[in-house]
């Protein structure tokens, strides 16, 4: 850390400076804060964390690295594995 500031503190300082510099009005700021906490997003985060805890509790978490390493991965020529992965991720993603 260059300035010896934690990430959360740095983000809060950046947000506060941005609000002052860009002269964001209270009404706009309220809309931004309300829209940042969507029910769907919070529900998905909750379910992901519950699933993670369930996997850890059952002991499957320790077995996952070995199971994943035994899966066959396609080999792209000329070291283009990252390109192949990016293509797969982009083709399977849904628009916002």
Image (tube, rainbow, N blue to C red):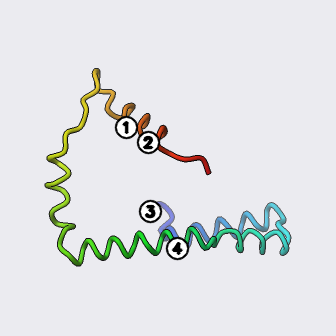
Instruction: State whether residue 46 is above or below residue 71.
Output: below
Q: CA distance from mark 2 to mark 3?
A: 32 Å
- Tell me the quarter of the picture where residue 77 sits: top left
Crowding at dot 3, Cα within 10 Å, few <14 / some 14-19 / many 20+, comes out as few
Mark 1 residue element:
helix
User: Which numbered mark, 3 or 4, is in the foreground of this view?
Assistant: 4
Mark identifier at residue 38: none
Q: Which residue in the structure is indicated by mark 4?
A: 43
The crowding category of the residue bearing disc 4, from other C-alpha atoms within 10 Å (few below 14, some 14 to 19, many at least 20), is few
Check if mark 1's residue and mark 2's residue have beta carbons within 8 Å.
yes
Rendered image: mark on residue 85: 1
Mark 4 or mark 1: whose residue is earlier in sequence: 4
Return the disc, 3 or 4, that comes first in the chain's sequence.
3
Above or below — where is 5 with respect to 22?
below
The residue identified by callout 2 is 89
Rendering coords of residue 82 (x, y %): 36, 35
Say whether marks 3 and 4 touch (CB < 8 Å): no
């Amino acid at each position: 850390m260059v300035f010896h500031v934690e990430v959360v503190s740095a983000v809060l300082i950046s947000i506060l400076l941005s609000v002052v510099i860009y002269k964001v009005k209270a009404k706009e700021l309220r809309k931004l804060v309300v829209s940042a906490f969507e029910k769907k997003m919070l529900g998905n985060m909750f379910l992901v964390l519950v699933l993670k805890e369930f996997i850890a509790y059952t002991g499957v978490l320790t077995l996952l690295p070995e199971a994943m390493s035994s899966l066959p991965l396609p080999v792209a020529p000329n070291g283009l594995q990252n390109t192949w992965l990016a293509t797969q991720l982009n083709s399977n993603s849904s628009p916002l």
